[in-house]
Image (tube, helix red, strand yellow):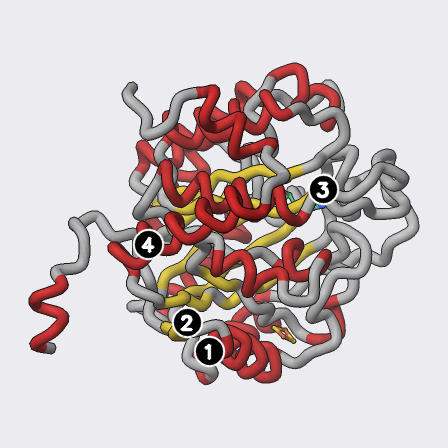
Amino acid sequence: MSSRFSDAELLHYITTEETGVAEKLFAEARKVREEYYRTDVYFRGLIEFTNYCKNDCFYCGIRAGNQSIERYRLTLEQILNSCRVGDLLGYQTFVLQGGEDPYFTDERILEIVENIRKTYPDHAITLSIGERSRESYEAFFRAGANRYLLRHETANEEHYQKMHPRSMSLQNRKQCLYDLKDIGYQVGAGFMVGTPFQTQENLLEDLRFIEELQPHMVGIGPFIPQASTPFGSYPQGSFEQTLRMVALTRLLLPRALIPATTALGTISPEGRERGLMAGANVVMPNLSPKAVRKLYALYDNKICTGDEAAECRLCMEGRIRNFGFVPNMCRGDFKESRKINRKVEEVE
Ligand code: 5AD
Ligand code: FES
């Protein structure tokens, strides 16, 4: 497949420490983003509904082996209530995210999706609940789920093995992503920047995988150590490098929906805003009940855990406007069509 960049060019941008080069890259990424999405930033309401997880990823704070955290599950009523709050605040996308929690069988997930779909026929429902069978993904889709987030985490087999227990495989994860796409979901892949043992070549492979998969969404955040995990004493990922990966992703996938992640905002006070300046165009403020926010601790010092949903909505809106972007509460589906027609726009 032809690409905008050669391997050597990508590696140059992945590794460069020259701010001039990075700034040019960000400016180019903003230009490309604007051709499809203007300066709009789409809001997604995130509902973190369970922090139980059967997996043991070495980087993640809610891994099964972490016995020092309190676990929670939201009830159907609590989930629906979070949706209600979100809807009142204007959200048209609900993102249901959780660990791989065996309590949430296909039947229970279906019950949740069906209930949300019934109440909100026009909202987008996004699931982010890990690896399941193709049949399960198909059933969720039929029940009304439209989108699915499943970061691949790293596209390199060897690196994947160093971040996960033997029970997990990159091959299976990639298969899930291809299945999800094939079923008709808008699919989000993604990776962390600066995870232990990651090489610059691994990041190049992440970009090449993204080009091959052509996901509709790409979540990119820095690795942030969580003290009670095996990776608890490794350094966090580079903020600048994460921004460059966001920009490169925008240039390779001009129409992608790319969030300015909470992890970016956690390692730098204006991290999310800088993510938008590097080509991102989505934010995902939290809609989970305040009481459980702190417990969804994928990594240490996560921001926004003490704020009400309404506060986050307002705060994020202000932050976005401060940087010259325009909050957009619409569903913000992937644009299948071509660039915005500037002539039409002018007479609107
Ligand atoms: N640092 C940064 N991101 C993390 N995630 C999990 N653990 C960490 C961490 N320690 C990310 C993973 C996962 C997403 C929900 O959160 O990429 O897919
Ligand atoms: Fe949550 Fe600012 S976005 S407090």
Quadrant of picture, ligand 2: bottom right
In which quadrant of the rendered view does residue 305 lie? bottom right
Residue wearing tag 1: 321
Indicate the amino acid at tag 3: Gly
What is the three-letter code of the residue carrying label 4? Lys
- Marks 2 and 3 close (CB-CB < 8 Å): no
Kind of residue at badge 1 = Arg
Q: CA distance from mark 2 to mark 3?
A: 26 Å
The residue that disc 2 covers is 325
> Residue 293's spot in the image, x, y percent?
72, 67
Say the numbered circle drawn on residue 31: 4
Q: Is mark 3 within 8 Å of ligand 1?
A: yes
Label 1: state its secondary structure: helix
**What residue appears at the point 74 percent right and 22 percent down from the top-left corner?**
162
Q: Return the x and y of residue 206 as percentages of the image width and height.
A: 52, 28
Q: Quadrant of the C terminus?
A: bottom left
